Image (tube, coloured by chain):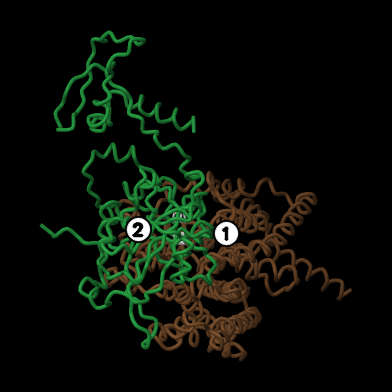
Chain colours: A green, B brown
Amino acid sequence: MDDQIKDTRRKFLNNGWKIGLASMIGGAALAHLKEGFAFEDTTPSGETMELMDVDGNIIEVDPMDVEELDLDHVTHNVRRGMPGRKFTMVVDLAKCQNALACQRSCNKHHFVTGDNAWLKIYKMQETEDTSPYWMPTMCMHCDQPACVTVCPVDATFKREDGLVLIDNDRCVGCRFCMAACPYSTRVFNWSEPNQEFEMNMDMVEELHSPEHAGMPSVKGTVDKCDFCPHQAEKGELPHCVTACPNGVFYFGDKYEDTVTNGNETVRLSKLLEENAGYRLFEDLGTEPSVYYLPPKDRLPFEEGLENYNEFQSVEKPDAP
Amino acid sequence: MSKYDQLIKDLGPRKFSLKGKLWVALLLAVTVAGIIAYVDQLIRGQVVTNMRDYVLWGLYISNFVFFVATSFVAALVVAALRLTKNEWRRPFVRMAQIVALACIIMAGITIIIDMARPDRMMNLFIHARLQSPITWDVIIIPTFIVVSLLLLYFPLIPDLAILRDHYSGTNKKLSKIYGFFAMKWRWSQQQINLQGKSIHLLVLMIIPLGLILESIDAYLFSTTYRVGWNSTNFGPYFISGAMVSGLGALITVVYIVRKNKQLENYITEYHFDKIGKLFNLTCLIYVYFNINEYLVPLFTAKKGESEHLETLLRGEFAIPFWIVTLVGLVFPAILLIFKRFRKPRPLYLIAIVVVLGAYWKRYLIVTPTLLHPYLPIQGVPENWHYYFPSVHEWLITGATLAMALLIITLLIRYVPVISIDRLAEEEAERLTSEKKAAA
Ligand code: SF4
Ligand code: SF4
């Protein structure tokens, strides 16, 4: 951990005048302009540095007045996970109507621009005699993840808090993990991703971490649902959970035995018990962290058909 | 050194004929085209292929599996026949080593071509994780390359020395090059002992290495949950398949070399008949494993599995499947039982068909499975529902095949295809024993 802090600091210093972080500092560091503590030497150095403020204006400030933004608010080891937590999700199929709000939100917040969304809503019908239902899927964050077993370089890894994440700076693009995952949830960046960010690219680079997949996506590497640890860190729910108008997704912590869909907070064990919760492909032994509640007394299936598009899961901005 | 003259004339390096030159030019052209396509793939990413999130492995991996399989011929012919002291192996051994070396080198290159981030290749060593079959491949392929290279090189040393001496008057430069590789070989007893021991050691190594190589290749597939790959039969199935494609490739090469170098006196019908029998045996074994892989599961196949078998046996992939199985394997296996089909020319034609079948077979192992994941394919563009390789993939794959053939062609051009040293020795032995008999 200490090493990490040092590392970031060094990086910051290296960036020095280049101050690729300009815009970030514009937003945040200006607020940190030192008030001038008594015990510090606050005499102006006479030099100035250029920064960009939130409105895009270039301003000149004394370097003495600039303080490093603490990007090290990540207090846990990214590879080991958040201590004492075990993330889990429950998907209530009875409430799913293929509204697609979750998918749209996920695509937006993870900057998914390819042809295959990470969160998919399948139109399911096992046999002719059984009735159809909608089934959202995402990475199951398996406790026995097939993808992690086969990755040759530990680019896909399993954390103690249950998450399976990808280090896009290490992945060699062999796609073995995609072949191994029985849930077909992994998506490959076949070309340079065509992403657009509102913030400065340098800031994107700086925030770049397995904990926020897709920011940015890296050509020739794999992406998938990350269970939004960047949200959990802020104490917020994953984007799909908050976006769903029907409260299909419950997210929470298995150790605390609570999950919430934003409206109601319930006991995980009770929810699963009362609704006969199950996991997908239990017989494979992958031990998913995502549970499903059967589509009993579900909302009318037909209403979802309107949104159903067999050949598209990522909306493309209309061609100019 | 006159005892070698005739042999050198027949087997030694010979300048390319016009046909040979055209052949090399063609191979070079195909290679260059492939390299250009590969550079484009590096720049634009693997989007230039027709692989996508569902068919995430395609022609490259099929090609890789084919190369790995074919390189097994080194273990089979070189080592197995040697250990069992089969005398008829002589004319095949060196060419088998050449084919195996070319194939295993290209297998290594092909797997890198399939990697989307070859720039991060070092990660495979820096961050290597032992439980991934890819890491096993990273270990076994370089090992196999080194061992098969040495297995080609060590037995070659006396021949290189012969050529060194042969050219010492006429072509100083060539003599020097051969001399360099001959490493001061003087037929001293010490050298001969050392060489014999080293070769024996390599021979002992190449068999387990070959088996491991083929098994790992199979495990790349069978360690996944995929229907059609997740089979305990896959290890031996791949090994038996490797014997077939390796021998097929060898017979093809031997026949062409024999024809172009007029080696009918060295590689006789007797030899073809013998290797034809071995080929027949391997084909029959492979038929047996195919039955295990495709027919027996029919009885108990669970839903996903039976759907997969269905697409192969009478669905989407039925036509290629049956062509590959019947024309590429079953018919040859039956025909080879008859002596008349083990004559050089028919055997050669059968071998070509079998090799083509073996190539296609690899494709049928990779693709249909990927198109039948557990969850239905939804929410992706329509053309992700099937797969046919793109121009880039064809060009690049073509280049890997051309490079393998180029390696084989060049080695055959400069290296005696049958050991001159051994032939001369045998000849001398025969003479002395005849003399003894006369006395
Ligand atoms: S769902 Fe697939 S990608 Fe996610 S952890 Fe399981 S095996 Fe890995
Ligand atoms: S594609 Fe990347 S994450 Fe997946 S197995 Fe290969 S190296 Fe690991």
Local secondary structure at mark 1: loop
Please state the horizontal and vertical placement of residue B149, each as a whole percent of the image: 60, 56
Q: Quadrant location of the C terminus of chain B?
A: bottom right
User: Which residue is denoted by mark 1 in the rendering?
Assistant: B415
Q: Can residue A190 be seen in this view?
A: no
In the rendered image, residue A285, in percent from the top left (x then y), is placed at 54, 67
Image quadrant where residue A202 sits? top left
In the rendering, at what x and y percent does residue B22 appear?
Answer: 38, 65
Q: Residue B160 carries which label?
A: none
Which residue lies under the disc numbered 2? A264
Q: Which residue is drawn at 47% across and 39% down?
A: A76
- Residue B218, visible in the rendered structure: yes
Which quadrant does ligand 1 occupy?
Answer: bottom left
User: Which chain does the numbered disc 1 sit on?
Assistant: B
> Which amino acid, mark 2?
Glu
Q: Tell me the subunit letter for badge 2.
A: A
Q: In this view, does A4 lie to the left or right of B141?
A: left
Q: Which of the two marks, 1 or 2, is nearer to us in this view?
A: 2
Which residue is at a point 36% across and 10% down the rendered structure image?
A39
